[in-house]
Image: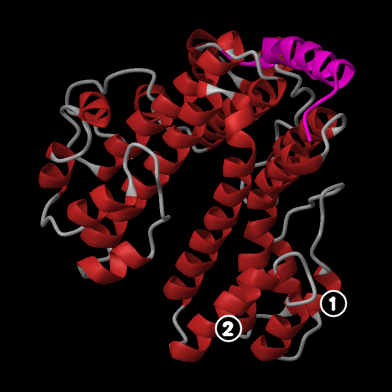
Amino acid sequence: MMLTTGADAYLHARVSIMMRRLLTPNQVRQMLDRPLSEQTAMLEAAHLAPLELGVAPHSGSSLEQRILSTTLQELLILVRPLSGPERQFLLRWANRIELSNLKAILRGKLNARSVADIREDLVDMEPFTTLPLESLLRTEDFSELLRQLEATPYADIARRARSVFEERRDLFALDAAVDRHFWVGLLVLAQQVEARQGASFHELIASIVDRINLVWLLRYRFVYGLPPAQAFYLLIPSSYHLNTAWLAELVKLESLPAVLDAVPDRLRSRLEGASLPFEVTQRLEQATYDAAYHALRHSPSALCRAFAYLVAREFDLRKVRAVYRAQALQLDPAITAFALGLAEPASGQQAA
């Protein structure tokens, strides 16, 4: 269902207001260079104040939850006027965050962790929670957990997890299968709305899927040492620039430089000179941010602009989190700036 004129206008107006919250590279550099006590004004401009500055940032901390809550509240505003596949697509995008809760419970049950320990790893997804967390936490074993999941919106993922679990009790294989199955489902929804959203939406989705597939391919082949067939099976089927046929050829190659030399031209120009998986990830994330920013500025589609804002905002909030962690750990600002793609490392320095 297409947006009505009124809903379309509402969404365009909301995005235009909210995009003022996005941070410039210079603002991020200023955050790195200033003590936490002097950053209130910048955080207010980004609608992130007040943060609890004295709390060491770690999973489950007030900083993590504040950033997550900010993301979800903004999504709630943007999804309000949507209906049909467009609404389903943005809600599925939110499910990426809840997926971390699902995987924490799956891993916890497989490792026989206590309910209290698993609960510490969970994030508050309100108002987008779809998992019956307490019921899942109370399950007696992994098989019962999967049975309960089959009565939730994650039923298809639960069935795939059961298949992987029955084949081999391998946490890596389970995590990878859950991730892949989620992205396959998200792409089904993306393709349902893509024809109505224009070229900017297509390019933004393409940048996300190409990035994930290439990063996964490099990780599976050259970090985890998986054979080509197994690594290829874990990638997302794609019709974008780095399509499935291209991935099938890349996965056979025996080194990172060989893979980067064989990617499509539009990716090769981005990756020229990269020698580490970290650098590849960093450059492809910047490509996604650029695609989102272009869509924000130029797309006539309200949904595309809303999605682009959410993508760009997520990158910004991750940078804020990285800055706070770096300052709490008293890391060299130059190294952190390089890790965030803001500067070249000084002589003799390497990104952590």
Towards the viewer: 94 or 319? 94
Quarter holding residue 133: bottom right
Residue depicted at 87% across the width and 47% down the height: 127
Residue depicted at 58% across the width and 51% down the height: 188
Q: Amino acid at mark 2?
A: Arg
User: In whole angstroms, how far apart are the C-alphas of marks 1 and 2?
Assistant: 18 Å
The answer to whether 15 appears left or right of 167 in the picture is right
Q: Is residue 131 magenta?
A: no
From the viewer's perspective, is residue 161 above or below residue 33? below
From the viewer's perspective, is residue 163 above or below residue 80? below
The answer to whether 220 appears left or right of 11 in the picture is left
Relative image position of residue 275 (x, y in whole percent): 17, 38
- Residues marked 1 and 2 touching at CB (< 8 Å): no
Q: Where is the N terminus found, in terms of image quarters?
A: top right
Q: Main secondary structure of the magenta part?
A: helix
Residue depicted at 73% across the width and 34% down the height: 71
Q: Is residue 201 visible?
A: yes
Q: Is residue 18 magenta?
A: yes
Q: Where is the C terminus found, in terms of image quarters?
A: top left
Q: Which mark is residue 135?
A: 1
From the viewer's perspective, is residue 344 above or below residue 154? above
Relative image position of residue 349 (x, y in whole percent): 23, 29
Q: Residues within 10 Å of mark 1 (few under 14, many from 20)?
A: few
Q: Residues within 10 Å of mark 2 (few under 14, many from 20)?
A: some
Which stretch appears magenta? 1-23
Residue depicted at 73% across the width and 42% down the height: 85
Q: Amino acid at mark 1?
A: Ser
In the rendered picture of this protein, how many numbered marks are placed on residues? 2
Q: Which residue is mark 2?
A: 162
Q: Nearer the viewer, mark 1 or mark 2?
A: 2
Q: Is residue 57 visible?
A: no
